[in-house]
Image (cartoon, rainbow, N blue to C red):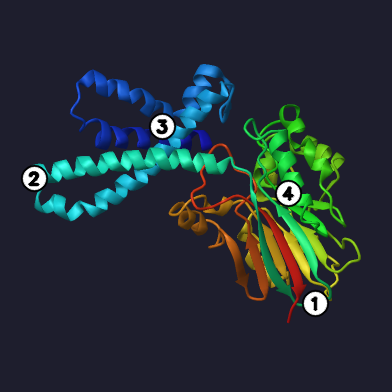
Amino acid sequence: MFIVGTIGIGCVLFCYTLWRIICPLPLRWWWKALLCVPLGMGAFRYPLLYAIYGGHFFRPACPMAVELLCTWLFMALLILLVLLLALEILLLLPSLIWRRSRKLRRTRFILCSLATLLAMSSAAWGMYQAFALPEVKEITIPLPKLLHPVRLAMLTDLHADRYKQAEFFHEVVARTNALQADAIVITGDFEDGHLYQLAPALAPLRHLKSRWGTFAVHGNHDYFSGHHAWQRYLNSLGIRFLNNEHVQPGPGHLVLAGVTDPAAARDNCEAPNLEKALDRAPQHKPIVLLAHQPGIAREAARRGVALQLSGHTHGGMAPGVRQLVARFNDGLVQGLYQRGNTWIYVSNATGIWSGLPLRLFTPAEITLIQLVPGN
């Protein structure tokens, strides 16, 4: 399904850009044919690289520079598609009135050229921001039933891959440890590859330090590349997974619960079960739930969860995309929300999936969550 969808999106990008950008250019046909080469490299990034270099469809065994070039072209085409559709709406009425106007054609050509330059520069800047180190973001949340302040350091969507290796995660660990948190929580999507490829990249996680330890749940990507082997390895780094279960870390100021991801079924793992995760949890203490995808929030609110921590959305990555992502995640895409008496915090993510490496006005983050007693 993903492969068919990828090829379908590529066809739309290729045909629409060819029609609106390349065909109207005042160039000889062979120059237009030459421009179709980078257009095809971007639109059919994965099918093309997989056909030439082999490997995995979404992780082709090509030189990194080649994949980065094709990824930049692909991101530029996505942005260009949005800009061109906006231009279509903007010029719809003038086109109906002055259909054969030379001035209108010239105006469209200029606007399309500017849109192309804007898309290419935005894609370059967005990719640079996507692979940048995350900054620390601090938020304070009042929780009823909490008797003493608690500091949680939150990481999510690390997405270890060929672009983010040990050096990246050494710095993430250093910035996290500097927060001197009571506990560190990680809400899934640790990697995008097999253990034998990426174990050294995540090895720095063994140096995470907090008073009560590091707790985590799995994300959807964690079930694509050997979930069980990865969990054993991450356990050896000192990370405790909460697979539909709960604990009372440290002196037991709160309950920390976690659920698996809906993608668990693809690897014959237990589906998310909030009832099981909260079974026999003390009701006189606030419950903090770790769930990779934020869509479980309404059920969490019904079951008396005080705070849900999630990732998955990457903050929507960019304006416009953010609104689309929100529609598929019950409106929960970035920042702090409330459903009834339940707080939900959705992180912008610590890393990025290299399949869509774009961040525009959506910086990566390590989140310091300061929980304080509240009414």
Q: Which badge, 1 or 3, is on the more N-terminal residue?
A: 3
Which quadrant holds the C terminus? bottom right
Q: Give the SS element for disc 4.
A: helix
In the rendered image, residue 137, in percent from the top left (x then y), is placed at: 65, 58
Q: Amino acid at mark 2?
A: Ser
Please report the residue visible at 36 percent of the width from the left and 29 percent of the height from the top: 39
- Real-space Cα separation, disc 4 to disc 2, in angstroms: 59 Å
In the rendered image, residue 58, in percent from the top left (x then y), is placed at: 56, 31
- Mark 2 vs mark 3: give the one in front: 2
Q: Looking at the image, which is closer to me, 318 or 303?
A: 318
Residue 258 numbered mark, or none: none
Residue annotated with mark 1:
145
Count of all numbered marks drawn on residues in the image: 4
In the rendered image, residue 269, in percent from the top left (x then y), is placed at: 75, 44
Q: Which badge, 4 or 1, is on the more N-terminal residue?
A: 1
Q: Which badge, 1 or 2, is on the more N-terminal residue?
A: 2
- Real-space Cα separation, disc 4 to disc 1, in angstroms: 30 Å
In the rendered image, residue 326, in percent from the top left (x then y), is placed at: 51, 58
Residue annotated with mark 4:
175
Residue annotated with mark 3:
43
- Real-space Cα separation, disc 4 to disc 3, in angstroms: 37 Å
- Real-space Cα separation, disc 1 to disc 3, in angstroms: 53 Å
Q: Which badge, 4 or 3, is on the more N-terminal residue?
A: 3
Q: Looking at the image, which is closer to me, 1 or 229?
A: 229
Residue annotated with mark 2:
101
